[in-house]
Image (cartoon, coloured by chain):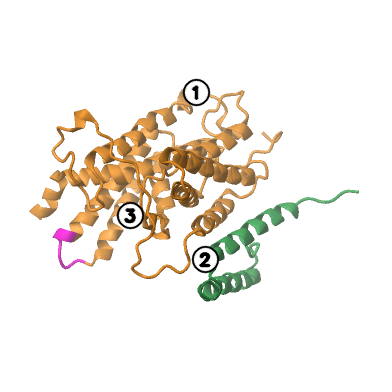
Amino acid sequence: MTEALDLLFNASLWAAVLRIATPLIFGVLGALLCERAGVLNLGIEGIMTMGAMVGWLSVFLGADLWTGLLIAAAAGALMGLLHAMLTVPLGLSQHVSGLGITLFRLGAGLLPLPPDREVGESPPTIEPFRPLDIPSCRTFPSSGRSCSAGGAHLPRADRRGGHGLCAEPHAARPCDPDDGGEPARGGGAGPGPDADPRRLRHGGLGADGAGRRVPDHGGLQQLLPRDGAGAGLDLHRPCGFRILEAGKGALGALLFAFFDAYQLRLQTVVEGVPYQLFLMAPYILSIVALILVARRAQVPEALMTPYRRGER
Amino acid sequence: MLAALHPVGVVAAAVFVATVFVGRDAMSRATGVPSFIADVIVALALLTMLVALLFTSYRVRR
């Protein structure tokens, strides 16, 4: 029992929380933009996989890391606009098109993988971003040494976590609930009376795609389906904490990341419990948290309602 | 969705998806094509059906 509590005071746990939460936070930001624009985007996993694969492949084929990052963002934006085309001008079911596009992107994004890789063979890798040396972080207890099973370093984890957390207030600003407007008109949460719902929705989905997963992994194995499986639900879960407040979305992402990092470490100190139960823990705890919080959730009235000019 | 909400269509759609998924590994080994193409086929079928259903709600006027 004391070992389980000791884990909470381990710097590596909190570094892992930031590392796991950062892509979730970027995903939550995208989901926030989409849902505030009135479109439910179930294509999150596919966008993440496609963006990661395209970015990784660009770097593998010779582009530098920043170019790869831009290409990944462009690929994500393109995929977001594909979803926008189906759901906004055509007004198709947002659920079905989101799921269909997720399936398409998951498959298409992984097509470049070699089909006949030998079992145990190391996958191709690229040189990832180097840890950022932040002078003020040098005094941290674990600074400069490996602090997680994945080999990430604390400054790097801080930098990546910082990006996600710094981006949250910017996402909160454009759709401030106090902005007024006509939520039921089709634009989502308080777009203002002059906003064009179609442009708003296209913009939300495009920006959502662009802001998705950044290719910060060096190994191809990190892009395999295992990595993306369930990530879409992971991202909608923090959104459930709730949509109109980016800060709470970030907290939800951090909470899920904490559960995930903690269960992984608990497996090493608690014996006799099947590891599947530990794997279930973050999901169960997140569902419980959702039950407690979701009652007060606020969603735009226009969410999932197709906008047709002249109807409203 | 592939079955257009028809109970009999569900059976046909399930057989179609199962056929694609069951055959993908054999296809991958035989032809060297990535097995992920099965997901692409099913996804494109779904999206095609979705857009086709949209067009059924319009009538061509002369």
Q: Which residue is mark 3?
A: A283
**Image colour assigned to chain B:** green
- SS at circle 3: helix
The structure residue drawn at horizontal position 54% and vertical position 63%, both measured from the top left corner, is B39
Q: Is residue A290 left or right of residue A107?
A: left
- The majority secondary structure of the magenta stretch comes to loop
Nearest to the observer: residue B5 or residue A218: A218
- Camera sees residue A68: yes
Q: Which chain's residue wears label 2?
A: B
- Camera sees residue A241: no
Q: Residues within 10 Å of mark 2 (few under 14, many from 20)?
A: many
Callout 3 and callout 1 share a chain: yes
Q: Which residues are magenta?
A: A268-273
* Circle 1: residue type: Asp
Q: Which chain's residue wears label 1?
A: A
**Rendered-image quadrant of the N terminus of chain A:** bottom left
Compare marks 3 and 1 and give the one earlier in the sequence: 1
How many angstroms separate mark 3 from mark 1 (CA)?
34 Å
Q: Position of residue A195 (x, y in %)?
A: 60, 26
Q: Which residue is mark 1?
A: A179
Q: Is residue A269 magenta?
A: yes
How many angstroms separate mark 1 from mark 2 (CA)?
49 Å
Q: Which residue is mark 2?
A: B34
Residue A292 found in image quarter: top left
* Circle 2: residue type: Pro
